[in-house]
Structure formats: C-alpha cells, structure tokens
Image (cartoon, grey):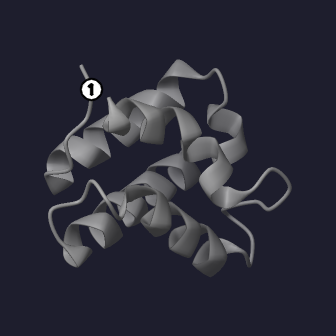
C-alpha cells in the first residue's frame, strides 16, 4: 500500500508550480527521492527511479504536474520503479 500512495503522490514531488524540465530539475529530483526513500531498496535505486521518471516525462514534454490523473505519467512511474527494483502496488 505505501508504494501505491507514493505513485499517487508523485506529482507533488516536483511541486505544483515548478516544472521538472526547467532549472528546477535538481529540486524535482531531490523531492522525488524523498518520496521514494522509504520504499527503495538502496540509495542508488531511489536515484535511478527518479531520474528515469523525470527523463521519461521530459521525453514526452510532460512535467510531474501533468501526471495528475494521467495514465501515461503513472505508467512511466510504474515502469521506472519496477526497473529500479522499487516495489509498486499492482
């Protein structure tokens, strides 16, 4: 259940106003890593999952705020979490 909460709360990891694709990338990465800190099996895993999520969103011209109610954004987050070994709810 905690992983499901993290995926639902993920849009807040970048903040409501800050764009992940702007100069706020470092802040977005840090917030995302704090979100996944308790679930990631290692510090490397939380860095990997968040980099993957931000890269995936940016490649599609999206930001974390675009994932609110957006299935594509949630799918990106889920794939990245699974690839990094971070447990997610099914």
Q: Nearer the viewer, residue 83 or 2?
A: 2
**Residue 85 versus residue 22 in the image, above or below:** above
Residue reaching furthest right?
17
> Where 42 falls versus 85 (above or below)?
below
Q: Quadrant of the C terminus?
A: top left
In this rendered view, identify the residue nearer to me: 3 or 48.
3
- Residue 52: percent from the left, percent from the top? 36, 58
Q: Nearer the viewer, residue 78 or 62?
A: 78
Taking the spot 71% from the left edge, 42% from the top edge, the residue there is 65
Question: Does residue 9 sit above or below 36 in this rendering?
Answer: above
58 left or right of 75 in image: right
Q: Residue at x 63, y 43 (%)?
A: 11
* Image coordinates for residue 70, horizontal then vertical, percent: 60, 23
How many numbered discs sit on the rendered protein?
1
Q: Secondary structure at mark 1?
A: loop
Q: Judge the density around disc 1: few (<14), some (14-19), many (≥20) Cα neighbours within 10 Å.
A: few
Can you tell which quarter of the image residue 49 is in? bottom left
Residue 49 appears in the figure: yes
Q: According to the image, label 1 marks what residue?
A: 89
Q: Position of residue 67 (x, y in %)?
A: 62, 34
Q: Describe residue 76's horizontal placement relative to residue 42 as left or right.
A: right
Residue 27 percent coordinates (x, y): 64, 76
Rendered-image quadrant of the N terminus: top left
Q: Residue at x 63, y 47 (%)?
A: 64
Reply above or below: 32 against 27. Answer: above
Residue 61 visible, this angle = no
Q: Is residue 88 left or right of residue 56?
A: left
């Amino acid at each position: 259940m905690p992983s499901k909460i993290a995926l639902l709360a993920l849009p807040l990891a970048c903040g409501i106003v800050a764009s992940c694709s702007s100069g706020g990338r470092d802040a977005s990465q840090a917030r995302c890593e704090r979100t996944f800190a308790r679930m990631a099996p290692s510090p490397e895993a939380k860095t990997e999952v968040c980099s993957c999520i931000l890269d995936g969103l940016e490649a599609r011209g999206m930001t974390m705020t675009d994932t609110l109610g957006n299935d594509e954004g949630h799918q990106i987050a889920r794939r990245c979490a699974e690839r990094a070994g971070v447990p997610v709810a099914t």
